[in-house]
Image (cartoon, rainbow, N blue to C red):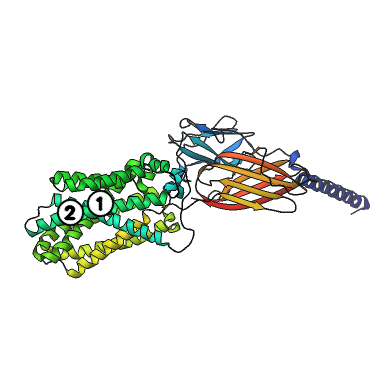
Amino acid sequence: MNTNALHHRHYRYNRFMKLFTLGVLLLACWLVWPASTVSAHSQLLETAPEAGARLAQSPEEIRLTFNEAVETKVGGIELLDSLSRQLKVSAIEANKDRTSIAVKPANLDEGVYTVTYRIISEDGHPVNGSYVFVVGNPPAAKDAATFDLHTQLGHAGHGSTASALTSSELILYAVRFFYYATLLLAAGVMLWKSITRFEGASLQLSKTWSLGTVRAFLFGSILYVFFHAREVMEDEPLSEWLKLLSRTSVGMAWLATVVLSLIGFLVLRGGRTVSVIWAVLLIAVESWSGHAEANNPKVLTVGLDFVHLTAAALWAGGLALLLALWIKDRKEAGRFAVRFSGGAVLSLAALVLTGVGMTLLFLPKLSYIWLTSWGVMLTIKAGLTLLVIIVGALLRMRVRRGDLPSATILRVDGVLMALIIVITSLFTYVSPLPANEPVSYHKMGAEMHVSLRVTPNVPGDNKITLKIWLPDVTGAPKSVVLRFRSEQHEDAPIDIPLEAYDDQEIEAFDGYGKYAYLASGPYIPYPGQWTAEIRVMDKNDNELVETTSFRNY
């Protein structure tokens, strides 16, 4: 190869290397060039319904509008209800340039709803987030305070702060047990007296027991109303007592119970129909004054509670009569046992079904059973009921064989009945829902002090207060962002629309300026574990971040 050819080849190689190096340098510059010089990713410009909107009726569609085209085959829009359950929506529809997408929900009832979106922009970048809107005027979220009569009356309770039971509390629990025992026995004996034809010794015994249970119930109802009213109205003026008895459903139910207990003596002289009506009214009044009345839908919860108490009265009253007959006349006990064993089966079935139904209505999630003493006692009651079913099956087997009831079986059944009434008298006054505590977070640091309050910290509407203290040399923040991020949907945080306000609280720190912000609205749309993310950008574009976790039920 001659010298010219070698020189030419060397020249082309050097030229290629220069072009290659230039290309690499241009590519590197493009990769590290500030993001502001590259086309921005898709951003959400507009939503319909708007974030935080309160609508009179269900929206026809949910529409999101972006600043550039988005992919419609990947990602989607989810709609969540107030329990974070996903609701069905139609497939995504897009406009011609794919900058606006929409889904159509089914007709939405009153409630707080969360729109969660996960979209891919045309350049392949993910866009996600969420926001909240309200339909109608949904009721306030329930927590433990819903079942507190002190709260309903507008004043604080007087519970003991000590962990040990006081003598007054022991007396109150004893009164509750006596009241529920006499109520179930009085109503149950009246019902059995009306549906069963007693003769001879059994007739006289049924009359004696009817009179005895009515007397005991009168005494129990007076004690019950007196001790509970005194506990609720401690240190309150007479006007508040009148308010309790005339303006609250619980107070009026108490009055009706005492009146019915007095009427019971007149009912003893009436016929079977009158006895049934009295027992039904008594159970109906009791159904209207417990947890069932504090839940929705009231017609269903109160109805289930009525059936539950009726079944309990039939079982308790029938068992009491069977025990009394067994002591006095074994043959009469054998005859009544045939009727009682069949009724007991139906009563226990009704107790189980209505108990399960009320539990599902009272609790947003079954897991809440393990978070309260109410759930623990309910579990114990369920175990005792299972034992009653087993004992009842043994009793029915003996009766169907023509044998007399076993003394041991009857004693065990009686003890189980007493234990169940004890549990019922206790957990009837315990909230089935865990207590929600307001969020109160404070942290001090050299670069920033933070204070966050969320009140009352329930699913739905809350008041949110955020305070930031920055060093005087730093000055006012350029931006303050507060996000609530759900553990269930971590990639779809809810931005809280903060508004600056003039805070009058004296919370000064030398060398620091205070900046206060406020928001009110349904920005905790469903219960769960949440993280509050606070992002503050100072004038030098330094971002300060603080997070805190909280939970509500």
* Residue 444 placement, left or right of 142: right
| Residue 54 visible in the picture | yes
Residue at 49% from the left image edge and 39% from the top image edge: 112
Which quarter of the picture shows residue 69? top right
Name the residue nearer the viewer: 511 or 519.
Answer: 511
* Relative image position of residue 265 (x, y in whole percent): 18, 48
In the rendered image, residue 178, in percent from the top left (x then y), is placed at 29, 57
Q: Residue furthest front?
A: 238
Q: Helix, strand or loop at disc 2? A: helix
- Disc 2: which residue: 211
Q: State left or right for residue 7 relative to residue 480.
A: right
Q: Give residue 247's position: percent from left, percent from top.
A: 38, 39
Q: Does residue 78 appear to the left or right of 201 in the view shown?
A: right
**Mark 1 element type:** helix
Residue depicted at 11% across the width and 66% down the height = 330
Q: Amino acid at mark 1?
A: Leu
Residue 20: x, y in percent?
Answer: 81, 48
Q: Is residue 346 visible?
A: no
Count of residue discs: 2
Q: In terms of depth relative to the viewer, which is nearer, 518 or 120?
A: 518
Closer to the camera, 97 or 296?
296
Q: Which residue is mark 1?
A: 218
Disc 2 residue type? Answer: Leu
Q: Residue furthest bottom?
A: 408
Asked where in the image residue 127 lies, by quadrant, the reply is top right
Q: Residue at x 48, y 31 (%)?
A: 59
Could you tell which of marks 1 and 2 lies nearer the N-terminus? 2
Question: In the drawing, what numbered circle is on residue 77?
Answer: none
Q: CA distance from mark 1 to mark 2?
A: 11 Å
- Image height of 452 relative to 341, above or below: above
